[in-house]
Image: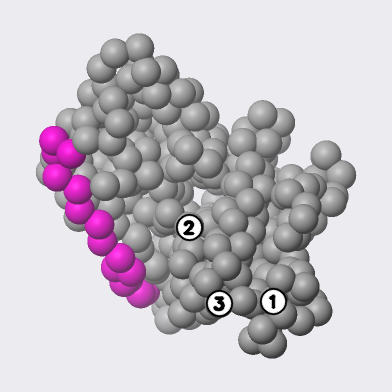
Amino acid sequence: MKSPILLLGISLLTSTACGGGGGSAGAGDSPLQITDALLQALVDGNASAASGLILSPNEFSKLMKCSGKEGREVKKQAMKEVGNDLKDAKNQMSYLSDGPRPKGLIGQITRFEVDDRDFEEAGQQDGPCTLARNIETVEIDFRYVLADSPWGLDKRGERDSMEIARIGKKYYIVEAPEMEAFEEFAKQAKSKPKAFGKERLKACRAEAPSNVKAIKEAQMAFEATEDQFLAIPWNPYSLPGKKAAQWTTSTGFEAISWQPDGKVRGQYQVTTTGWSAGSGLGTRGDFEVTGRIDCDGDGVAATYTATKSLNAKRITKDNVY
């Protein structure tokens, strides 16, 4: 079973989360309704309404019941990490709500698609914690268009995505969309979004060395039975950046029996050298696992590598996230 944290796209074990939601309680009655409600709140410049659609820390705390000292520590850590994610999303929605809007600005959802659904039933256990409420998580892809009159709504518009969760009868945003079309309005205001703290960026970056280490171990196990190492191209095909990406199957990693638990923020590949391609001399070959991750979205990736004889290490500067 996925843990309650993983259900919301937040990996507590590998500390990969760098997105999320925040704000006061608010909800929509359907995936399409909450998507449109967010768009209209941003069109109106209503920060309270936009951030109110994000899952609140109070609602999140009700999702799991934990027992014993270990359980209390797990829940404390979850609330700390998820609380930061909630604040980040609330700050971002407030920032995008700021700035002057053109007179008569309207917005419309032009395309809406449910990409994936995942349902977990209350009562399932993960270590010292039990899922206290039913959760359905929904991944959404959509397009929206902004115009200053109804005649301008025939444009293709901007593509975006987000993740929501149904808790009880209401939907909440748990991974906020980028909504980049509102960036130009926000830039005209004095306020700026609060940047991720250094500790948050380090926690996000920790995904890469953890996965590089696991891929190395999977390669060693593969070589023990197949007498060779396996070269595997980049997965995902493009570096995800600030938003986590879906892991693509049938790309080579399944051959060494490895895949991440959920979405990833990093990008991974394996190259091989020497006699490692079915020559019967695999132990004399070598491989290099490379993982790249760009948690702060500045276009400069933190990079980690590992080989048969060397453990995962960072080869970029410490201030690269």
Residue occupied by mark 1:
282
- Residue at the spot 66% in from the left edge and 44% down from the top edge: 205
**Labels 2 and 1 touching (C-beta < 8 A):** no
First along the sequence among labels 2 and 1: 2
Residue 220 visible in the snapshot? yes
**Labels 1 and 3 touching (C-beta < 8 A):** yes
Q: Residue furthest front?
A: 280
- Residue at the spot 42% in from the left edge and 56% down from the top edge: 262
First along the sequence among labels 1 and 3: 3
Side of 208 relative to 258 (left or right): right
x, y percent for residue 67: 25, 17
Q: Which residue lies furthest to the top in this view?
A: 69
90 or 295: which is nearer to us?
295
x, y percent for residue 85: 50, 35
Q: Distance between the residues labelled 2 and 1?
A: 26 Å
Q: What residue type is labelled 3?
A: Glu
Question: Which class describes the residues within 10 Å of circle 3: few (<14), some (14-19), or many (20+)?
Answer: some
Q: What residue type is labelled 1?
A: Gly
Stretch of the chain drawn in magenta: 110-124
Q: Residue 260 carries which label?
A: 2
Residue occupied by mark 3:
226
272 or 319: which is nearer to us?
272
262 or 253: which is nearer to us?
253
